[in-house]
Image: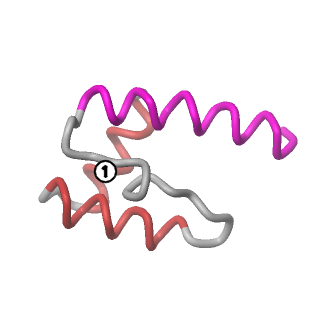
Amino acid sequence: MNKTELKGNWNEQKGKLKKHFAVLTDNDLMFEEGKKDVMIGKLQQKLGKSKEEIEKIMKEL
């Protein structure tokens, strides 16, 4: 999968996350290569969920 496909898939997932969790903003969902853990940490704080719960939610989208 190339970067364009990855970015397209992330944009789709980001939209689904924002629809499911109205409190999330674009800044909360900024994905920078190599900084997945930082983004997961932000989501944990904002949603009050564990890392495992966040990863499960993202896989189910």
Point 20% across, 66% down: residue: 45
Which of the 4 image quarters holds residue 15? top left
The image shows residue 23, relative to residue 44, as above or below, that is above
Q: Position of residue 50 (x, y in %)?
A: 21, 61
Q: Per the image, is 14 magenta?
A: yes
Q: Look at the magenta stretch and give its main secondary structure.
A: helix
The image shows residue 44, relative to residue 60, as above or below, that is below
Q: Per the image, is 23 magenta?
A: no
The image shows residue 57, relative to residue 43, as above or below, that is above
- The number of numbered discs placed on residues in the rendered structure image is 1
- The residue carrying mark 1 is 54
The image shows residue 39, relative to residue 10, as above or below, that is below
Q: Position of residue 58 (x, y in %)?
A: 41, 40
In terms of depth relative to the viewer, which is nearer, 58 or 42? Answer: 42
Q: Position of residue 39 (x, y in %)?
A: 43, 64
Q: Which span is picked out in magenta? A: 1-20
Point 68% across, 65% down: residue: 33
Point 87% across, 42% down: residue: 2
Q: Secondary structure at mark 1?
A: helix
Quarter of the figure with the N terminus? top right
- Residue 9 placement, left or right of 39: right
Counting other residues with Cα less than 10 Å from the Cα at mark 1, is it few (<14), some (14-19), or many (20 or more)?
some
Which of the 4 image quarters holds residue 38? bottom left
Q: Residue furthest left?
A: 48
Three-letter amino acid code of the residue under disc 1: Ile
- Residue 49 placement, left or right of 4: left
Q: Residue furthest front?
A: 26
